[in-house]
């Protein structure tokens, strides 16, 4: 863990000034959850040369403050639901009700950030009776610029007061996993709505993914403001214009009179800046020892062909900074766009395919399908329980070794032309295939350079393959795709209830 710690600590040091006496980093508070069964990194700031000892459940580790910073690594700890984490230096700091269980990092944009109190009526009963100290969350404050002060924040337990502000996907994941494991589950919620993947990556990783154009464009836009004061004036003018526009729209001003919505000025506080959120938010929790990562993001990169490369480099960077080359990294495919994206177009389909491909090619990654719980025209579908539970199924099978758990949705592996029909084979196929609605126009074939045409399908006798019949009079198919839309219903499932991932494949002749 040493290498990952020093990368994170360098970022951490840019955010916080050394205290007169040793203290924990802000991510360690009362009610914190530490990772069980693995060496645990604990860090903070202090007086130069100060002797520091950290202790918990009969284990301790000591060090000396250097350059205003300290770090210790505690040995692997057994699970415990409540104990004290003690820091002894010039003074003593004690954190109470600290648990040792399993920690998961939640990151991404608004669908990961989406709170339980935004999921009414589906969350009403849950919130009315919320009381589970075995599930806890720390929400990293939204902060687009690392130079701004970091607001105070702390670990919260799942009760009636705090439950409304838990990540909905994160909570439902934690609930399902906690029921199986019986240990405290801690959620480190580092998510920010409306953000592209490059905001969470370092500039070096973006460049390695072929994103030099993004970096050049960012530099150009930021340079349009000669100093912070000029940018702040532009921001205040924008904010006033936006508020006025919102009020006019709310009062019923006709569309033709309303005019375009004011555009946020792009500058050093823009949340979409390459590398910005990595420095201002992710650095706060790097490298908080965790069991794995849940990632729900992609809407702000819709249609971008380089998303897959970006995602690969981002995953690699997370694993390097956590010094865990096999750190599980699970991905939610994006579901439904706003009405600005016509259903028949494919910007979201491109992102889904990139997410699927990255997940299946990485032995320590996985993905969950969310399209079947999307909502037409709504980028924030409110049924988050199925998404969280699918993440939990994935984790229980891949991380915790639960036998016979339906883990990852199957996806098409190859398509072969046989006797005028296309036979589609799948990977990760538990059980048998089912067609739940044969009337849905979600299967299409195309000849070389030709238009896409609707096709029909049936399941093979062994239940493992899909046999697709091209339209009568059509050319020999060279491509086949399923659910290749910004938004559409799904018709293919396993008999265990997992939806088949959308796909697009070239059709090959039978060897």
Image (cartoon, helix red, strand yellow):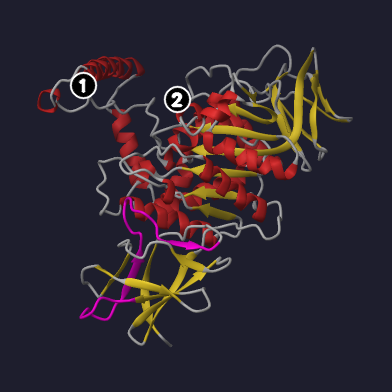
Q: Residue at x 64, y 42 (%)?
A: 176
Position of 49 with respect to 197 (left or right) is: right
Q: Within 10 angstroms of label 1, few (less than 14), some, or many (20 or more) residues?
A: some
Q: Depth check: 80 or 496 in front?
A: 496
Judged from this view, the residue extending furthest toward the right is 58
Task: Give me the residue at 33% from left, 53% from top.
Answer: 488
Quarter of the image for residue 126 reads: top right
Q: Position of residue 376 (x, y in %)?
A: 32, 44
Q: For the residue labelled by badge 1, is the local secondary structure a helix, a strand or a loop?
A: helix
Q: Disc 1 marks which residue?
A: 249
Q: Are marks 2 and 1 in contact (CB under 8 Å)?
A: no
The x and y percentages for residue 333 are: 45, 50
From the image, which quarter does the N terminus lie in? top right
Answer with left or right where residue 298 lies relative to residue 345. right
Circle 2 Cα neighbour tier, 10 Å, few/some/many (<14 / 14–19 / ≥20): many
Element carrying mark 2: loop
Q: Main secondary structure of the magenta part?
A: loop
Of residue 299 and residue 275, the one placed in the foreground of this image is 299
Say if residue 209 shows up in the picture. no
* Residue for point 56% across, 23% down: 15
Q: In the rendered structure, which segment of residues is drawn in magenta?
A: 469-495
Does the segment drawn in magenta span residue 475?
yes
Counting from the top left corner in percent of width and height, residue 141 is at 52, 23
Residue at x 42% of width, y 41% of height: 198
Asked whether residue 396 appears in the rendered view, the answer is yes
Q: From the viewer's perspective, is residue 138 above or below residue 230?
A: below
Q: Is residue 293 magenta?
A: no
Left or right: residue 67 compared with residue 218: right
Sequence-first disc among 2 and 1 = 2
- Residue that badge 2 annotates: 145
The picture places residue 260, in percent across and down from the top left corner, at 17, 28
């Amino acid at each position: 863990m040493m290498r990952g710690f020093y990368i994170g600590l360098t970022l951490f040091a840019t955010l916080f000034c050394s205290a007169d006496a040793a203290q924990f980093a802000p991510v360690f508070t009362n009610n914190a959850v530490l990772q069980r069964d693995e060496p645990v990194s604990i860090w903070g700031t202090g007086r130069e040369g100060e002797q520091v000892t950290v202790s918990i459940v009969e284990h301790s580790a000591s060090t000396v403050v250097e350059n205003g910073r300290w770090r210790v690594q505690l040995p692997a700890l057994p699970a415990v639901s409540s104990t004290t984490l003690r820091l002894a230096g010039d003074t003593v700091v004690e954190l109470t009700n600290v648990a040792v269980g399993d920690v998961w990092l939640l990151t991404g944009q608004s669908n990961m950030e989406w709170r339980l109190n935004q999921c009414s009526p589906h969350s009403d009963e849950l919130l009315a009776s919320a009381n589970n100290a075995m599930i806890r969350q720390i929400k990293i404050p939204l902060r687009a610029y690392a130079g701004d002060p970091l607001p105070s924040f702390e670990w919260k337990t799942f009760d009636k007061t705090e439950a409304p502000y838990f990540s909905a996907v994160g909570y439902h994941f934690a609930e399902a996993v906690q029921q199986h494991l019986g240990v405290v589950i801690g959620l480190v919620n580092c998510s920010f709505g409306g953000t592209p993947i490059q905001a969470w990556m370092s500039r070096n990783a973006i460049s390695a993914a072929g994103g030099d154009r993004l970096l050049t464009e960012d530099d150009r836009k930021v340079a349009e403001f000669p100093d912070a004061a000029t940018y702040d004036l532009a921001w205040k003018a924008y904010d006033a214009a936006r508020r006025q526009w919102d009020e006019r729209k709310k009062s019923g001003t006709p569309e033709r009179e309303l005019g375009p919505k004011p555009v946020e000025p792009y500058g050093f506080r823009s949340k979409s800046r390459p590398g910005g959120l990595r420095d201002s938010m992710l650095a706060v929790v790097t490298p908080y020892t965790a069991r794995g990562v849940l990632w729900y993001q992609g809407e702000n990169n819709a249609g971008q062909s380089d998303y897959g490369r970006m995602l690969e480099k981002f995953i690699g960077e997370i694993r390097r900074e956590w010094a865990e080359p096999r750190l599980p990294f699970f991905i939610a495919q994006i579901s439904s766009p706003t009405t600005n994206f016509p259903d028949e177009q494919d910007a979201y389909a491109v992102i889904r395919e990139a997410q699927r491909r990255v997940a299946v090619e990485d032995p320590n990654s996985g993905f969950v399908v969310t399209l079947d719980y999307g909502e037409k025209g709504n980028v924030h579908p409110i049924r988050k329980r199925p998404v969280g539970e699918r993440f939990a199924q994935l984790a229980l099978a891949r991380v915790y070794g639960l036998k016979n758990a339906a883990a990852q949705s199957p996806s098409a592996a190859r398509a072969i032309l046989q006797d005028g029909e296309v036979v589609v084979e799948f990977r990760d196929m538990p059980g048998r295939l089912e067609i739940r609605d044969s009337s849905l126009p979600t299967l299409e074939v195309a000849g070389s350079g030709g238009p896409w045409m609707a096709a029909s399908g049936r399941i093979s006798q062994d239940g493992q393959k899909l046999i697709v019949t091209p339209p009568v009079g059509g050319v020999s198919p060279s491509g086949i795709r399923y659910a290749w839309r910004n938004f559409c219903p799904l018709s293919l499932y396993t008999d265990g209830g997992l939806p088949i991932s959308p796909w697009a494949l070239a059709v090959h002749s039978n060897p």
